[in-house]
Image: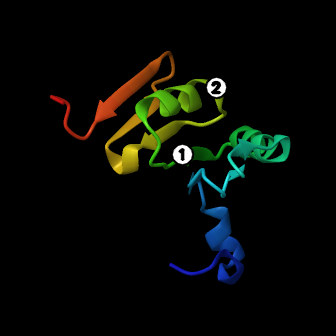
Amino acid sequence: MKPLAQATPDELAAVRGVFTDIDETVSTRGRITSRAYDALWRLHDAGFKVVPVTGRSAGWCDHIARFWPVDAVVGENGGFYFYHDGTRLKRRFLHDDA
């Protein structure tokens, strides 16, 4: 792994998706700015897979998966992920029997 600034054009052209934290990465002081939300849309519209990864609870992640321009969201520090299968929202938990 190396900083993006050191990547070659061919390496950058091979990037197909973005994993990102939310707090103080996509959000600023607890809020999603229009600029940040627009950036998510631009990534989505350009064909990138966008997946926020957060410690937030399932309730927050359900909202994010449904209303943000993302392909999936990982929540509770990897305890589950929600994703779109093309027609509906699917949920997978680290321990499905929990």
Residue 75 in the image: state x and y as whole percent: 42, 42
Q: Secondary structure at mark 1?
A: strand
Q: Is residue 10 above or below residue 28?
A: below
Q: Is residue 48 above or below residue 81?
A: below
Q: Is residue 76 left or right of residue 26?
A: left
Q: Is residue 59 left or right of residue 35?
A: left
Look at label 1 and name its amino acid: Val
Decide which of 69, 54 is in the foreground and name it. Answer: 54
- Residue ID for mark 1: 51
Q: Residue at x 50, y 16 (%)?
A: 87
Look at label 2 and name its amino acid: Phe
- Residue ID for mark 2: 67
Residue 4 in the image: state x and y as whole percent: 66, 75
Label count reads 2
Q: Is residue 36 left or right of residue 87?
A: right
Q: Residue at x 48, y 17 (%)?
A: 88
On residue 80, the disc is: none
**Which of pointers 2 and 1 indicates the residue nearer the eye?**
2
Mark 2 or mark 1: whose residue is earlier in sequence? 1
